[in-house]
Amino acid sequence: MKSNALSEKLRLSQDAQTDVALLRDALTIDSVTGRETPFARFLEKQLSGLGLQTGISTFEDQRENVWGISHSDGPNLMVLGHTDTVHVRGWSEHWQDDPRKDPFGGVEVDGQIWSRGASDLKGGICAAIAGYRLLHRVGVQPSCGLTFAFIGDEESGEPGSGVSAGAKDLVRRIKSDEIPRPDFAVYVEPTNLDVYTAQIGFFIADISVTGKTAYFGTPELGVDALKATHLLLSRIWKHEADLSAGPRHDLVGTSSILVTDIQGGGFIAVPGDCKLSLIRKLRPGEVIDDAVSAFEAALSTKDLPEGIEVTIRYPAGRDHPKGGSPVENDPDLSAVNLLQSCIRATRSEAGQADGAPYWSEMPFLTEQIGCPTVYCAPGDIAVAHTFEERIEVEEYLAAVRAFALFFAGFNTSHVP
């Protein structure tokens, strides 16, 4: 069936009420990082109900990943997404008597569904599942193998988690052939249905500055940690200016560094310690180890006042022990072009090639198993992690049809 005819058949056959109900059911499930398992079980039920061969694996204290496989002699396409969301602390207080007060309510207001995870990224997961279901409804079988893989522990913010433990488990199982090795993958992070072929990298640095406290009347007996921190901040901001004036990537811009937190003092005395945190953005082509070395050289702790000690900790290891790698894929890949055309057939203003201003788990596929990967899904990253998180119903329904078209059209000609 030609793509235009199939697009029209999908439009006429789509059951919008059922597709939205799937999303609303998903949103009722609390899956804040560390509590992903009930949502994983929900997804396993959806996948098995569509005839897929499903599997569940555990990682870190019995938290679960889930996958569903449709085998084929053709190439393998993977749809990947994380099952966890960020916390909902303050949500109910923010909305008070508004219908949106329940963070897991999935309330529709002005054509948009409000809930934690609506955009990031249960909308993408449900659109992909509903797209496969829609293909079944119209009697079209994909010519490719298809793997849905939904994993936990992507989000940060909860103690002892957020280190991509789910992605690491998935990669191990792909390498051991328990899960088919994909030829191309779509990670369903929100992109407003544009196609992100590149993403930033990052590392976080927690810096502790230790001096010596002393009574305010005899400050000469102390070593002021805040004064030393002031010197370090000046050097960090000089490094920031150098990065901003440096090379620029067409899709994600320049590298940068941002101080995000500072704490120190607290007594009527010479401050004996100070702590600050920062995040460094890397553009594609940069190497985390090189960026860390440049940062530490710019910090230049050697000539600080006598008695000052500085320690640096890198707490956010992902695919790299000190952070997450930047990634760039060829935007002219045949599979990318196919995905763009499928999106434009359902939502003409979308489908643009762009870069992700966020970090997610693309490097686990691109760097560790050599699979070209893009981000693409309904939803707006600008409202993720906020009390404004929501997803537009019409965009979500367009995504269902776009994924159905993509699953139907992906074949050996789209394998790099």
Image (cartoon, rainbow, N blue to C red):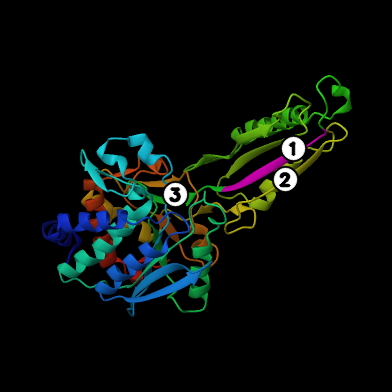
The answer for how far apart the CA atoms under marks 1 and 2 are is 11 Å
Category of crowding for the residue at label 3, using alpha-carbon neighbours closer than 10 angstroms: few (below 14), some (14–19), many (at least 20): many
**Circle 3: element type:** loop
Question: Would you say residue 153 is visible in this rendering?
Answer: yes
Q: Which residues are magenta?
A: 202-212
On whether residue 380 falls in the magenta region, the answer is no
Type of amino acid under label 2: Ile
Q: Is residue 198 above or below residue 179?
A: above
Type of amino acid under label 1: Leu
> Which residue is disc 2 drawn over?
312
Residue closest to the eye, 217 or 143 = 217
Identify the image quadrant of residue 66: bottom left
- Earlier sequence position, callout 1 versus callout 2: 1
x, y percent for residue 100: 28, 40
The numbered disc on residue 299 is 1
Residue closest to the eye, 157 or 139 = 157
- Earlier sequence position, callout 3 versus callout 2: 3
> Which residue is disc 3 drawn over?
86
Category of crowding for the residue at label 2, using alpha-carbon neighbours closer than 10 angstroms: few (below 14), some (14–19), many (at least 20): some
